Amino acid sequence: MKQYLICFLFAFTATSLYAQPPLETKFPDYAFLNYQMTFEKVKTAAAKSDTVVKKLFAAKGIKYPCKNILWRAFKGPSEMELWARNSINDTFVLIKNYQICALSGILGPKRWEGDKQVPEGFYFLSDFKPNSAYYLSMLVGYPNYSDLIQGNKEKPGGDIYIHGACMTIGCMPMTDELIGELYIISMNARAYGQLNIPVQIYPIRYTQKSIDFLGREYKNEAEKQKFWVNIKRAYDYFEATHRTLPVMYDSKGNYAF
């Protein structure tokens, strides 16, 4: 347990350095919001999405702005789900399923810089880029502790974003309209107190048909198979309970639940 805890604390810190305010920050964090709203693209996205987003959350009985959101991405079908809950004592409710408009690489985790892979595993949003060259961008906290242990230790890669412009090498792009919606939802969650917004990335939804596909198409790739079985435990738990497990790691970089 001590070993797991140390790894957990390291990973929590490593994925939280970019966007977190000082500990004395009060919420709503108007300094963060006001800075974001100085950018015309953010103001435009907020104006376009405000009414739509409020209706989405209201239809599911979730207060908005919501400070308990979760993103789940699935590389195979190129989809990203938004889940939310009113408090940490509640279960998550599916708010909307978004289409990722392009993906590079193949199924499997990212292991080194330049492999063009979209990561797989458990991350947090670690920065917001209102002046992005790809319209609007949110940085995913890759590499995490698991990636640093199991991937290339000298050049694991980085700069993995959820962004607009519908083009990518290793990121998860949306259309400009959709990234505006995702950005405003996440920005408000951050401003209202959710300093660590989870992003779970899976190769597939673990249906029997999809599992059979992985077993058939990647039958000779033992490392991928082992990794997919490892992260499936978190997927299965969420599907059964609509709650998340703490992200911890063992000394070999496997997720420990």
Image (cartoon, rainbow, N blue to C red):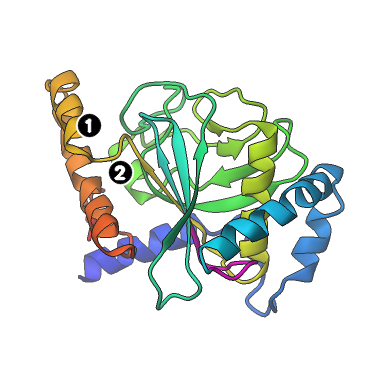
For numbered disc 2, what is the local secondary structure? helix
Give the image location of residue 178, x and y in percent: 64, 39
Q: What are the residue bounds of the magenta stretch?
A: 62-70
Is there CB contact under 8 Å for labels 2 and 1? no
In depth, the one of 35 and 46 nearer the eye is 46
Classify residue 256 as left or right of residue 77.
left
In depth, the one of 241 and 198 nearer the eye is 241
Q: Which residue is mark 1?
A: 210
Q: Is residue 249 visible?
A: no
Residue 180 among those drawn in magenta: no
Give the image location of residue 40, x and y in percent: 86, 44
Q: Is residue 243 visible?
A: yes
Identify the mark nearer the N-term, 2 or 1.
2
Please count the marks in the image.
Answer: 2
Q: Which residue is mark 2?
A: 149
Residue at (33% x, 33% y) in the render: 109
| Foreground tag (2 vs 1) | 1
* Picture quarter with the N terminus: bottom left
Give the image location of residue 246, x and y in percent: 32, 65
